[in-house]
Image (cartoon, helix red, strand yellow):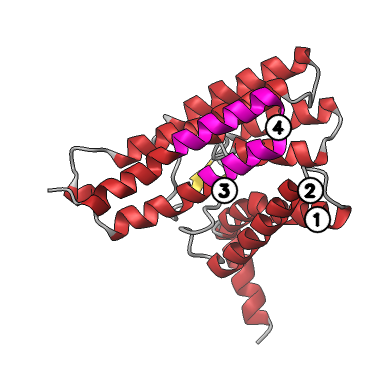
Amino acid sequence: MPSAKTWSVHLLTASGSAFALLAALAVMRGAWAETFIWLGAALFVDGIDGPLARSFRVGERMPWFDGAILDLVIDYATYVFIPALIVARSGLMPPILAVPCAILVAVIGALYFADTRMKTRENGFRGFPAVWNMVVFLLMAFWPPAIVSAATIVVFAALTFAPIEFIHPVRVRRLRHVTLAVTALWAVFSIWTVVEELRPAWPVLLGLGASTAYLTVVGAVLQAARRPWIAKRANRAVRGSR
């Protein structure tokens, strides 16, 4: 018999849909900082509901209710659909670019969430993990030329199905402490950026960009380090230094 704790975890996950709706309403008003506040709240919920579900053994107590499917529905709304809406409405680029880019985000994101091979053996992600909320947030903070914004979206869309790994900040064990520290810094810089109405001073942008760069490439670096020829070269270097 499911307990109140079990239901509360599912309700916590489902609360992401409320944050998605609030974010959509903020997009309609052009309230961009508020939009990312709601998306940030959804991101926080997504970060804690999984560990809570495992701690309370929700899957065992409610085997007829699939929390993973619920999580994917919410994630698509907050990680993909709302960011696509921001691309279409924010003025990052003219409509002739914005609408196709928004459609690209929505469609590629939908395809990614249906890919059963998205997780690697180390609990990372195979291909860009459809975190379009982060990509669009950075574009809104840095506000590059329209062609750069469009090119960025096209590149990450292509990386979605590339055989390149991206790290999960919590579940990948290698460099976990470093990655968690960088993730915490990214969160601090992101909150600061939102408080400054997406127009922070350059030191904040520098920190935001550097932490994002680490989180973007560290998975590929760890993937490359597992390749036999790199591992052999590293072992030879270690033996040569003794």
Q: Please state if 19 lies on the left or on the right of 71 as rendered.
A: right
- The residue labelled by disc 1 is 204
Question: In terms of secondary structure, where does tag 4 sit?
Answer: loop
Question: In terms of secondary structure, where does tag 3 sit?
Answer: strand
Position of residue 213 relative to residue 22, above or below, is below
In terms of sequence position, does the residue under pointer 2 or pointer 4 come before the other? Answer: 4
- The residue labelled by disc 3 is 166
Q: CA distance from mark 3 to mark 4?
A: 31 Å
The nearer-to-camera label among 3 and 4 is 4
The x and y percentages for residue 17 are 45, 34
Q: Between 144 and 155, which is closer to the camera in this rendering?
A: 144
Q: Residue at x 78, y 57 (%)?
A: 207
In terms of sequence position, does the residue under pointer 3 or pointer 2 come before the other? Answer: 3
Question: Contact, CB < 8 Å: mark 4 with mark 1?
Answer: no
In terms of sequence position, does the residue under pointer 3 or pointer 4 come before the other? Answer: 4
Question: In terms of secondary structure, where does tag 1 sit?
Answer: helix
- The residue labelled by disc 4 is 31
Question: Contact, CB < 8 Å: mark 1 with mark 2?
Answer: yes
Q: Residue at x 84, y 34 (%)?
A: 144
In terms of sequence position, does the residue under pointer 4 or pointer 1 come before the other? Answer: 4
Q: Which residues are magenta?
A: 16-42
In terms of sequence position, does the residue under pointer 1 or pointer 2 come before the other? Answer: 2
Q: Main secondary structure of the magenta part?
A: helix
- The residue labelled by disc 2 is 196
**Residue located farthest toward the bottom when viewing the structure as drawn:** 242
Question: In terms of secondary structure, where does tag 2 sit?
Answer: loop
Specify the amino acid type for callout 3: Phe
The x and y percentages for residue 201 are 87, 52
**Which label sits on residue 72?**
none
